[in-house]
Image: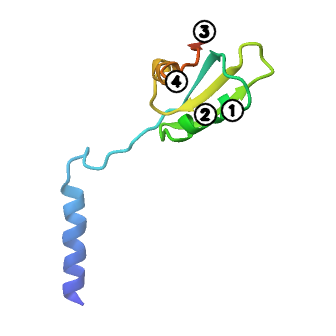
Amino acid sequence: MQRINMKSTTLVSAMIDTPPNYFMLRVVTRQILVFKTDILAGEEEGWVRFLLDNKPEILQWNFDHADIDHVLRVVTCCLYPRDIEVMLREEGFFCEELPD
C-alpha cells in the first residue's frame, strides 16, 4: 500500500511542478460569414453542398433562396471570407461577402 501512495504522490508533484502553460486551453470562436451568390436551388446547391460538407472548418451553412441575393451563411471557426469566395469562384460560382 505504501508503494501505491508513493507513486500517486510523485504523479501529483510532477503535475504541480509543470510550467503554468503546460496545460493549454484551446478557445474556438465561431463567426458567421454572409455572402451574396448566384447559386440556385437544385443541382448547383447540391454541388456546393458537397464542397462545404467536406470542409471540417465549416461548422454549419445554409442558403436563403427567398432572398434576391441567394444568401449563403457559413458558420466557421477559422476560415476567412476570402477562403469561401475563392473556393466557390474556382467552381464557377459568383460569391461576394456582404457588408455587415
Res. 99 mark: 3
Q: Which mark is residue 43?
A: 1
Distance from Cα at disc 4 to Cα at disc 2: 9 Å
Amino acid of disc 2: Trp
Number of marks present in the image shown: 4
Q: Quadrant of residue 65?
A: top right
Disc 2 or 3, which lies upstream in sequence?
2
Badge nearest the viewer, 3 or 1: 1
Q: Check disc 3 and give the amino acid type.
A: Pro
Residue 99 is situated, as x and y percent measured from the top left of the image, at 60, 9
Outermost residue to the right: 66
Q: Earlier in the sequence, mark 4 or mark 2?
A: 2
Distance between the Cα atoms at labels 1 and 2?
6 Å
- Disc 2 versus disc 3: distance between alpha carbons? 26 Å
Q: Looking at the picture, which amino acid does disc 1 mark?
A: Glu
Q: Residue at x 37, y 44 (%)?
A: 25
Q: Which residue is mark 2?
A: 47
